[in-house]
Image: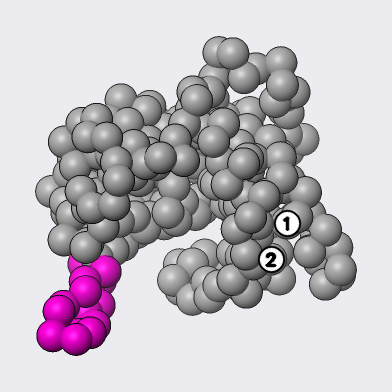
Amino acid sequence: MNKLDTFNLEDSQASSTKNHFLAWDKEYTHLKWGGPAPIRDIQAYLLLGSTVLDAGSGNGRYLGELARHYNAVGIDISITALNGSRARLSRSGRFAEHLGASILDLPFKTHTFDGILCYGVLQHLFKKERESAVEEFSSILRKGGFFFFEAFGYKDMRCGGEPSIHCEERTFSRQNGIIYHYFTKEEVRTLFKGFEIMELEDVIKEKNFKGKVYRRHLIKGIFRKT
């Protein structure tokens, strides 16, 4: 892997972040570790030893598993999250590069990565930010590389619920300052129009409690850079 071009997060915040990005550092001061998360989808597409970016790696739920099999790099806007992730990987004897970065201004050379994992991240951006982020991802992904996507879907029970401010279509600002957007599959297709769609599916889970149905809706996709 070529040497990564890094940058100082504090020096770049004025130009590369918004208030809703900065809210994440406070959020991670009380978020609990949920344990490691499976990476079976990634393993089905990427060879061992591939160079993989976890974009929005948080406290390392996926990054720790990626580090078992790949040359893994994690970025996040939250220094608190990165510190926790770095310490957790160190205790387990694994290593991944950790960088403070905004996905709107990625500190990497073009065509650096074989794969990019972006789970539960694009849902926290405004429309123009989502489009800008995908352009950034396309630039650093190698031809034939894979992008792994997961985000909230519009059928989710939380869409428009809870105390929030409506900002854009299916986009809301919560009291903690964090943005929540709920995707449609057509919207995802448009967002990744420059990629080949390998997989795109709705994942809907419902629970019935006291006669009321509670629905969780995710949209998952795997895209290939052509």
- Count the marks: how many? 2
Label drawn at residue 64: 2
Q: Look at 25% across and 77% down and name the residue there.
A: 205
- Is 206 included in the stretch rendered in magenta? yes
Q: Secondary structure at mark 1?
A: helix
Residue 5: image x %, image y %?
72, 28
- Residue 138 visible, this orientation: no
Tell me which corner region of the image, top left, top right, bottom left or bottom right, holds residue 128: top left
Specify whether 182 is left or right of 5: left
The secondary structure that dominates the magenta segment is: strand
Q: Is residue 163 above or below residue 185?
A: above
In the image, 50 versus 181, the foreground residue is 181
Q: Is residue 28 visible?
A: yes
Neighbourhood count class around disc 1 (C-alpha, 10 Å): few under 14, some 14–19, many 20 upward: many
Q: Which mark is residue 85?
A: 1
Q: Residues within 10 Å of mark 2 (few under 14, many from 20)?
A: many
Q: Nearer the viewer, residue 201 or 172?
A: 172
The residue under label 2 is which amino acid type?
Answer: Gly
Q: Which residues are magenta?
A: 199-216
- Mark 2 vs 1: CB contact within 8 A: yes
* Residue shown at the point (85%, 63%) measured from the top left: 90
